[in-house]
């Protein structure tokens, strides 16, 4: 179904009815990256768009163990309205349609804790500087049994054709459903963890790109169920095994010029094509504020164990052209890269709220530009193979991998400012709770407990 910009509520009801939709779901995400929803019969779509559905503000405080963590900004009193965003509603299989909601107060003001609103605000700030961004998400997940237990290892080959053959029916149905929902899937492949697949989404404007992640996860939930399976979006589905990344490709443009592509730039390597000076400042801003932003990008109790060198999770705090061990991988323009030069933020994992993660990354980039931060030298060696001594000798360090340290680093950070006090408080409330809530579990128990926690 294609619903265009400015779609009215009445048009939407008609289109959905024609497509055989019975139920319309509208979602709102929270800082623990849980996806909440209210649904209405299709005949009530208009009311969903205009009056919205009621939602308690404590939905922001739901933590991974199902408890509610309050902040000074919300409690059990009061109500929010979830207003369906008509142009973003998509038809999914089984008579279902789904889309994001604008979460507003009863007076109709944007809810300052709502992640989609936080990102919208950052996009507006970029616009004030004549900047636009595109974001392309990658989504990794591990196929498991419906109860979360591991599938038999079988003949899984990392990046193997066999995996695609094994799962061709599931992949085919997923791509078809994605097509119907208007999602641009660019690529699908078997990752290097057993039964781990990855789908990459085409670049879109930041808010729409994050909407696409939620839609794609919903589709993955629908199609895996139909195949008697489930999908784990945990940063570490199985203790000791390779993790699930949620890498984000970003590019920034000003007046039609891609700031990450300066064809004659030979600053950092022999070959031409590097970031423009302003693009370099944006990368510098991301690196400079990255540790403080990890509470958003890698803030869950299972985020740290994923960030080990050698796992391609971007655990080294540096940037480098095509460097899979760098927190920020630079992809230069050229025939091999049809979308143009961009940076891939590899540290981000699947426990991160995609709206908040993009918001802080763009906020850091903006901060780097505003402060004209100098771009550090690029690192093109495989830092995943350095031991501690060699890393120190090279003047490099790893990103943080301990949840309490990560949450401490958020205090006073640029990321905290980008979120604003309401969303920052909600993030800390749900994440700090994880530190004590799961303290009694060993690594295996923790992975098992949270394996399906971020699945839809
Ligand atoms: N699974 C890796 C991660 O945790 C990423 C592998 C890759 O796509 O480079 O981020
Ligand atoms: Mg991957």
Image (cartoon, helix red, strand yellow):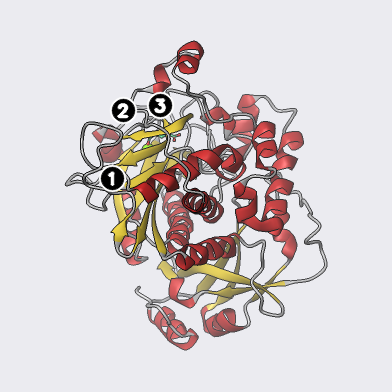
Does residue 426 sit above or below 382 in this rendering?
Answer: below
Which residue does the numbered mark 1 point to in the structure image?
Answer: 168
Q: Quadrant of ligand 1?
A: top left
Residue 200 location (% of width, % of height):
35, 49
N-terminal of the two: label 1 or label 3? 3
Q: Which residue position is annotated with label 2?
A: 157
The reply to whether dot 1 and dot 2 touch (C-beta < 8 Å) is no
* Left or right of residue 120: residue 180: left
Q: How many marks?
A: 3
Q: Picture coordinates of residue 249 (x, y %)?
A: 38, 48
Q: Residue furthest bottom?
A: 10
Q: Which residue is mark 3?
A: 153
Give me the residue at 58% from left, 43% from top: 293
3D distance between C-alphas at marks 1 and 2: 15 Å
Q: Is residue 248 left or right of residue 121?
A: left
User: Which residue is at 69% across, 33% downward?
Assistant: 404
């Amino acid at each position: 179904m294609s619903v265009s910009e400015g779609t009215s509520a009445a048009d939407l009801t008609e289109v959905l009815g024609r497509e055989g939709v019975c139920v319309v779901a509208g979602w709102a995400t929270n800082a623990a990256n849980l996806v909440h929803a209210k649904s209405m019969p299709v005949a009530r779509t208009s009311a969903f768009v205009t009056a919205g559905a009621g939602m308690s503000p404590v939905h922001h405080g739901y933590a991974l163990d199902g408890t509610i963590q309050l902040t000074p900004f919300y409690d059990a009193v009061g109500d929010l309205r979830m207003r369906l965003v008509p142009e973003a509603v998509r038809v999914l299989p089984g008579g279902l349609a789904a889309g994001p909601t604008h979460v507003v107060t009863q007076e109709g003001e944007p809810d300052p804790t709502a992640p989609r609103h936080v990102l919208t605000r950052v996009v507006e700030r970029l616009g004030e500087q004549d900047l636009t961004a595109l974001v392309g998400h990658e989504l990794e997940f591990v196929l498991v049994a419906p109860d979360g237990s591991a599938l038999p290892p079988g003949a899984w080959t990392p990046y193997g054709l066999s995996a695609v053959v094994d799962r061709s029916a599931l992949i085919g149905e997923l791509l078809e459903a994605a097509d119907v929902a208007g999602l641009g899937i660019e690529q699908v492949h078997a990752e290097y963890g057993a039964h781990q697949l990855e789908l990459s989404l085409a670049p879109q404007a930041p808010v729409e790109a994050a909407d696409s992640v939620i839609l794609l996860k919903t589709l993955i939930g629908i199609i895996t169920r139909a195949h008697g399976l489930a999908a784990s979006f945990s940063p570490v589905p199985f203790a000791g095994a390779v993790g699930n990344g949620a890498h984000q490709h970003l590019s920034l443009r000003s007046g039609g010029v891609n700031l990450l592509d300066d064809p004659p730039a030979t600053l950092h390597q022999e070959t031409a094509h590097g970031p423009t000076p302003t693009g370099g400042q944006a990368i510098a801003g991301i690196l400079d504020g990255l540790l403080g932003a990890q509470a958003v990008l890698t803030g869950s109790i299972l985020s740290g164990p994923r960030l080990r060198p050698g796992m391609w999770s971007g655990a080294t705090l540096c940037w480098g052209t095509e460097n899979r061990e760098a927190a920020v991988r630079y992809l230069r323009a050229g025939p091999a890269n049809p979308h143009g030069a961009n940076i891939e933020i590899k540290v981000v994992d699947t426990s991160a709220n995609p709206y908040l993660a993009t918001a802080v990354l763009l906020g850091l980039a903006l901060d780097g530009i505003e402060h004209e931060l100098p771009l550090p030298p690029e690192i093109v060696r495989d830092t995943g193979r350095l031991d501690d001594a060699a890393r120190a000798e090279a003047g490099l360090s790893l990103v943080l991998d301990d949840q309490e340290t990560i949450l401490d680093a958020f205090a006073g950070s640029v990321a905290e400012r980008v979120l604003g006090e309401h969303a920052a408080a909600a993030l800390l409330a749900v994440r700090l709770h994880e530190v004590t809530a799961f303290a009694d579990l060993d690594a295996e128990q923790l992975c098992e407990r949270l394996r399906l926690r971020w699945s839809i």
